[in-house]
Image (cartoon, coloured by chain):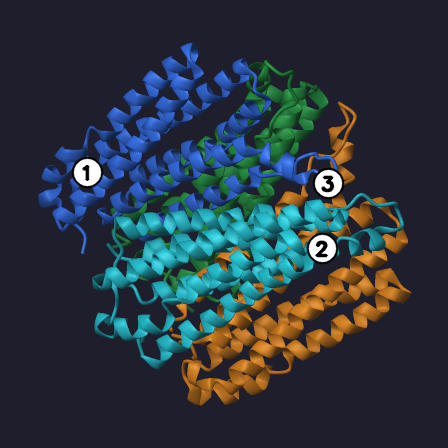
Chain colours: A cyan, B blue, C green, D orange
């Protein structure tokens, strides 16, 4: 089957998820005349929003570049994509937990919020690894399959690296929330660097016209 | 008329519905420092979310594969599709009822929630049966219409089978909620198997390039 | 400019608006063990939802068929389309007012809700009339422009007829809410019939391949 | 890489953002039988909704026309587009603040709301300037690159003009809220005029078929 409806549907889910994240910004309870202070005290919402917006945005970039290499889909890929989208939509909730817990400044709650965030991004990275493996096995679905091996070799461990970072973050959070939070941020930044590697790799091999 | 805007519009509705389901995850009332327990007590939301996400996801897969066989649309199909989308969007509400009722652990409420869930999925399966019948009659709208009879024969009773399972579930819920719930789950799993049958059938007959 | 991004963007707005309407279904306040009665008492939400879903759905069908006749867009059409989408998204709010007012059974509130509903649909029909006029003047944007006059003559007064029905409804509501409500329903049904006329007209003139 | 998925994804974000804005219309607290007065007292919501709907709508028109000139994308443009969409989704929140503050009629709160609104639109205009600069440098991504210089020269300062208006508005708000608000409105109207200039420029140079 053709790949374009799968792309359009996935684009839809990504676009909606990104935009729904903005609904976390809710009018605070405030004393009339002091809206400013109340809004500024909501900075954790903005911080959590930025973290998740650029994380999900990077996932979209990955999805965009990766599926540009695929020419056909089959039922296994359809289902794998659906499971991946499921895990990605979940990020909405830990994002809310995070902004709430940080605003309330309770250490136990912040730890729990970061732990649930780390768990979701860990699962997403794991599923990307499954997707990469699937592609390695089903080269007949790819454009320019003769160059796929070479292309794949350079990037195939990126999802595992990202899983590793999040596992360390998950453990780290239990001991020191700040270190754990920085590790999650590092994981997200690593995602972004991995995207640049993927993107340049595709351009170098002229895999897409 | 061409089929592509109908597909794009339906993809949009499916994508949004799937993503809106995640809004059911709302910050619980919690004692500061005990966010973790409060969130974990929300497991029925996650369970209901997974049930409906993969149910709606499977419906999208069906829609995707089925409409890939159609080359043109007319006003009857446009309207049939609109009624189908209407019924599918309704699933959002019983999903909320289900997670609320299970969280409150009241048997009468759980029974009501499962009953309303079963009713909506029953109507959806019934409408898919109408869609299958419509296609059987309007073979001029299809790609490769000469092979359609053969393709259709193998799958035409799948929606009726699914209606039957949900009718049994609907009756079962009134006597035993657990049995009824399992029957609904069975119905959703059957959907998924029916999708695999449809998908392989299409690939076997090379109905789509 | 090409018309396809305008269509895709409009499809997006329609799909989202249809799906957002479902958010009106909110968990009612209920006595544990009596969820059923509380949900059944929400029937006005279902009624208002159905009214607006099929109204917006019919508008989409119109938009779909009408823009299938257009081959190019320009800035005037872009802006006209944007104003039309603005008016259509507004329907969300009177729909909420309607289900609330009917549930509370207060005559003055019901009258206000129906009045605001009638005002919004009146504006939408008026804008569709502007759209029809625009098309009559800018035949160079159309596919098969030589047949456009003939096609246009048959349908050009449909939006005005619909405006007329809603004006009568608007007056009627002030005297008798039930009669006014039936007139709004009649207006929506007329929309649907007008769509069928448009659709058959297009098929008869083979205006779209 | 091809540009179409980037366009489709951006269209999705724009369409969802426009439609989510309507969620600001929430049922007011009202005395039964006085729904009308309560709704009419919500006029600031409608005013803020119109301001933001047509602002975001104009941004979409810009995006639509500008990306119609681009034939390929690369990772820099992907990321730039993502940052732009991020800033645009933020507009949702100052819109809510604005309608709340105006409804409560507190001068300090209104000033804060307008200030945050002006800051967000200022950032958006600044990012459009970066986008214009990017295009001037990467003419190889454009359709009809030989005419690009001539096309670009006429419009390249429009985002800067718009930044300037918003900076003046930002300062003005601190002294006189009404003047500041009018300057923001003027900025949005200037956007619209700048769009018309861009659109006519494209048509004049026949840059898009």
Instruction: Give the x, y percent position of residue B160.
Output: 25, 25
Task: Let me know if residue A53 appears in the view.
Answer: yes
Which quadrant does the N terminus of chain D fall into? bottom left
User: Residue at image x 41%, y 80%?
Assistant: D143
Q: Which mark is residue A44?
A: 2
Q: Residues within 10 Å of mark 1 (few under 14, many from 20)?
A: few
Mark 3: which secondary structure? Answer: loop
Q: Which mark is residue C197?
A: none
Asked if marks 3 and 2 touch (Cβ < 8 Å), the reply is: no
Q: Which residue is mark 3?
A: B33
CA distance separating discs 2 and 1: 56 Å
Task: Find residue B138 and name its label.
Answer: 1
Between marks 3 and 2 in the image, the one whose residue lies nearer the viewer: 3
On-image quarter of the C terminus of chain D: bottom left
| CB atoms of marks 3 and 1 within 8 Å | no
Q: Residue at x 38, y 27 (%)?
A: B121
Label 2 Cα neighbours within 10 Å, binned few <14 / some 14-19 / many ≥20: some
Which SS class for mark 2? helix
């Amino acid at each position: 089957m053709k790949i374009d409806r799968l792309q359009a549907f996935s684009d839809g889910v990504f676009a909606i998820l990104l935009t729904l994240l903005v609904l976390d910004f809710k009018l605070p309870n405030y004393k009339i005349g002091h809206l400013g202070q109340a809004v500024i005290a909501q900075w954790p919402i903005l911080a959590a929003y930025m973290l998740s917006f650029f994380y999900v945005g990077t996932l979209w970039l990955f999805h965009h570049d990766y599926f540009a290499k695929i020419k056909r889909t089959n039922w296994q890929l359809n289902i794998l994509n659906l499971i991946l989208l499921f895990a990605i939509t979940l990020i909405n909730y830990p994002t809310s937990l995070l902004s709430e817990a940080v605003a309330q400044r309770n250490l136990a709650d912040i730890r729990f919020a970061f732990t649930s965030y780390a768990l979701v991004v860990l699962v997403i990275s794991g599923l990307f690894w499954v997707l990469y493996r699937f592609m390695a096995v089903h080269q007949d679905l790819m454009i320019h399959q003769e160059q796929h091996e070479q292309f794949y070799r350079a990037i195939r461990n990126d999802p595992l690296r990202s899983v590793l970072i999040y596992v360390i973050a998950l453990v780290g959070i239990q001991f020191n929330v700040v270190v754990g939070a920085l590790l999650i941020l590092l994981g997200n930044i690593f995602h972004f660097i991995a995207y640049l590697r993927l993107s340049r790799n595709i351009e170098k091999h002229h895999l897409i016209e």
